[in-house]
Amino acid sequence: MIKITDVVEEEYINPGTRMCAGCSMALLYRFALKGLGPKTILTVPASCLTVLHGMQGFCTTNVSVLHTPFATTGASASGIVASLEEKGLINEICVVAFAGDGGTADIGIQALSGAAERGTNFIYACYDNEAYMNTGVQRSGSTPLGAFTATTPGGKMKVKKNMPKIMEAHGIPYVATANASYPIDVYEKFKKAREIKGTKYIHILAPCPPGWGYDPKDSIKIGKLANETGFWPLYEIINGKLTLSRDSKRYLDSNKRKPIEEYLSVQKRFKNISMENIERYKDYIITLWNEIEQRIKN
Amino acid sequence: MKDKKKVKILTGNHAAAHALRQAKVEVISAYPITPQSPVVEKISDFINEGKMKAKFLMVESEHSAAAACCAASATGSRVGTATSAHGLMLMYEMLPWASGTRLPIVINLATRSCGAPWSVWDDHSDFIAARDVGWIQIMCEDNQEIYDTNIQAFKIAEDPRVYVPTIVAYDGYILSHTMMPIELEKQENIDGFLPPLNHHINLSDISQVKGVGPVTTPDIIKRAEGTAPGYYEYRYSLQKALENSIEIIKEVHDQFAEKFGRYYGNGLFKTISDEDADTIIFAMGSVSAQARSAIKKLRKLGIKIGLVSLRLFRPFPAIQLREYFKEKKNIIVFDRDIGYGYEGVLCYELKAALYGLKKPPFIKGYIVGLGGRDITDDHLIEGVQKALKQSDEGIISYTTDFLGLKLEELEL
């Protein structure tokens, strides 16, 4: 276990990005890039990250980034990897695709699935703020049950798509969940993924103040509640073996989990959530953790 | 000792595959589609047999194929691929992306009609649909031209004065699956003609931090670090590069002709039996090939007719065509495509190019051969004769006339 003082001091995001106040994606991106280091090429689709990377002529990060259309992230990374393999540079340079949840679970899933099936040697990271935030909060496949968005004014009727599970089904060597409120965990997971050959998938929950409806100062608190209520457990699946991450281990004991209402009630997007849907959340969390428990036992 | 050339009997698709091999393409990303698939199958064989060192990505869609091509090109590799019809349609989003980023990718297009209804057969609809995305577009007329044009295309696209992606097109089935003798040049001679890629974007050089393809604004941006162009300036430079590329396309064509002894008109269009002709057929690809036959018969009927076979569709060689056509009396355009709601695309492009001539020629356009409908000499002769009658009578019509339609048979 590392401490904050063990995290590299080098910064890969320059000051003055255009992120919203309290944006947790900027925080997790900062720690992810620290974990990856300078020998990295990024590719990002249309997303809040496009905004972070700045306007024409200037690059906000200290590593190169290839912007790419929305549906293409996995393919774009595949092209970079192919070129680096052809040049004999793939063992030196790490290719990292970083996309939002819409770019991953919806429009980009085909290219991502293709890249994973081909065993493309890269890291795919999804920062999940649970809707199309960059375009004004429209629902995505990753929007959770009951959440208000601009296109689900009555709350979303369907549950969140389980991307880590879908990616695990590809038989890739590394799948991990993370959470912007645990930046050291984010750092360690990227550092570890960098050393593994093949397709690596990291799915990071990224609370979004304007999209979720809370005060920007509360981003860390809200992200922690997602973990503490058991809604978003942190784990790694390495070659099929699931391990709970340090910050989620204690919630294997259901008595230690906070009630889901504590997470839902502090976000305006769940203001009108029905009692029935709250019950569905409770059932979901029980099922989720039972499955984790079974996997750990076996 | 005499440098004997290697002649092989090849389909158009395999001619393209050999050219990609000899151009030493470094990354190929593709998805199968009829009638292009034999190009990438052959490339797979070359790689499997160790005859080609490229990295080959068989991806899950043409959209991804084009995206991976763009990314590999931006990482500094020479990139080529092939597609047809629906494949090009699916790539469409990536086409202005590639040209906007100025990536010198070469796509071989075995032309095919676009559904619905389904048709795997040939017409130029797909080629025409890529008109306004900032690519160089060259149409070939035989298999040797496919091979030669591919080699030229990399040299044109990668020229630092150009850096514009290029489509090399040829008629599906009519060329893609038809065997013809091809002169294959020795590798050292190809290498002498086509130097390795010197790319202006190379993400693999991590000492140079770059943001490629970022958000732009309507205006330029001034900051302490420097001034950056807006979208408008980026697109202006693409247009200028395309305009200027006409001279470079001619230059590369002439260098090729000098080195290998094969030429295609002036590199922009070919003129056939036009010395004394006051009437000219204007067409491209398979339609030109058929017109070569039809004009022999028309001449026997006493019509002084020639053919201009367009090679370079984009950038459109308007100045050169205008100069060529200024003294001509009649032009009959046969389009294996249609600008739906108007007329054949070659027809209206040519009309626009000749705007303002003091004595503009009479121009009549016909649609032919959509969805692989056979184009015969008789169709072209019928079109020429009808057009010349209209010319004599001074009739200018804006209706689109289709040759070879069989409506009567349907109504029986």
Image: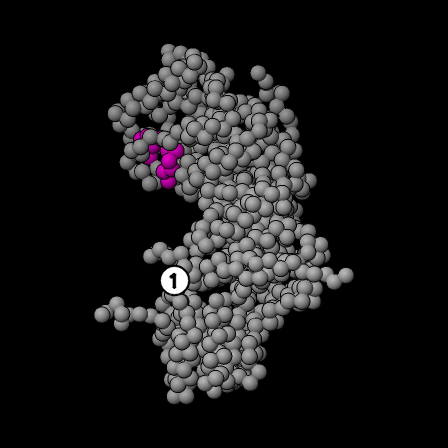
Find the magenta span and give its range: A138-148
Residue beneath disc 1: B371
Which residue sits at x=53%, y=66%?
B141
Q: Nearer the viewer, residue B2 or B177?
A: B2
In the image, residue B218 sits, relative to residue B332, either above or below, namely above
Split into 4 quadrants, where in the image is the N terminus of chain B?
A: bottom right
Residue A199 appears in the figure = yes
The residue carrying pointer 1 sits among few (fewer than 14), some (14 to 19) or many (20 or more) residues within 10 Å by Cα, namely many
Percent of width and height locating residue B55 = 59, 42
Percent of width and height locating residue B394 = 40, 87
Which quarter of the picture shows residue B338? Answer: bottom left
Percent of width and height locating residue B257 = 66, 67
Name the amino acid, label 1. Answer: Gly
In the image, residue B147 sits, relative to residue A109, either above or below, namely below
In the image, residue B4 sits, relative to residue A46, either above or below, namely below
Which residue sits at x=58%, y=42%?
B48
